[in-house]
Amino acid sequence: MEKLKFYSYPSCTSCRRTKSWLKSQGVDFNEQHLFRETPSADELREILRLTTQGIDEILAKRSKEFKALDIDIEDLTVNEFLNLVAEKPKLLRRPILTNGEKIVVGYDVDGLRGITDRKMEYTEQIS
């Protein structure tokens, strides 16, 4: 299995919980700060390709950035959407994890187990 790519933002609660789960399971991953090392349009295209719900799966519709947009996302081409998100990465839900074949968006233990092949139980630590 390819090492996981973990797109995160350190102050994000879901990112911290996901990272804690990965570490507790001994899963190796490469972490990439979403805002300092914004994914390229090609990386975003690959992430989008792995989704089951398309743009809706990775778009943070409740974010201030999304609400402040003066455009209808539905009117954008895929390339326009990818360029917009590359320019404004706060439009992405987080965290995003991929092994190149599967994707998990947000803190989702079942999804994490599926992407890491870890079947062990996890007891959440109180932060």
Image (tube, rainbow, N blue to C red):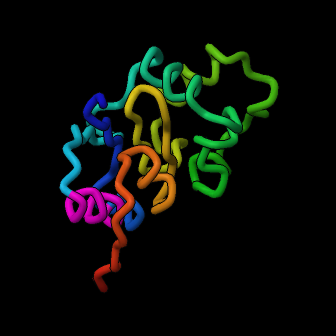
The boundaries of the magenta stretch are 16-25
Q: Residue at image x 49%, y 46%?
A: 104
Judge from the rendering whether residue 39 lies leftward or rightward of residue 68; answer left or right: left
Left or right position of 101 against 66: left
Q: Is residue 90 left or right of residue 36?
A: right
Instruction: Quadrant for the N terminus, please.
Output: top left
Q: 90 and 7: which one is in front?
A: 7
For residue 14, side relative to residue 26 (left or right): right
Asked if 42 appears above or below 14 in the picture, the reply is above
Report the front residue among 58 and 90.
58
Can you give x and y, in whole percent of width and height, for residue 16 in the image?
Answer: 31, 63
Up the image or down, 44 lies above or below 57; here it is above
Nearer to me, 101 or 91: 101
Q: Quadrant of residue 19?
A: bottom left
User: What is the quadrant of residue 23 in the picture?
Assistant: bottom left
- Residue at image point 34% right, 79% down: 123
Instruction: Please tell me whether the stretch drawn in magenta is mainly helix, strand or loop.
Output: helix
Q: Is residue 11 or residue 25 the one in the foreground? A: 25
Q: Residue 33 location, x and y as percent? A: 28, 42
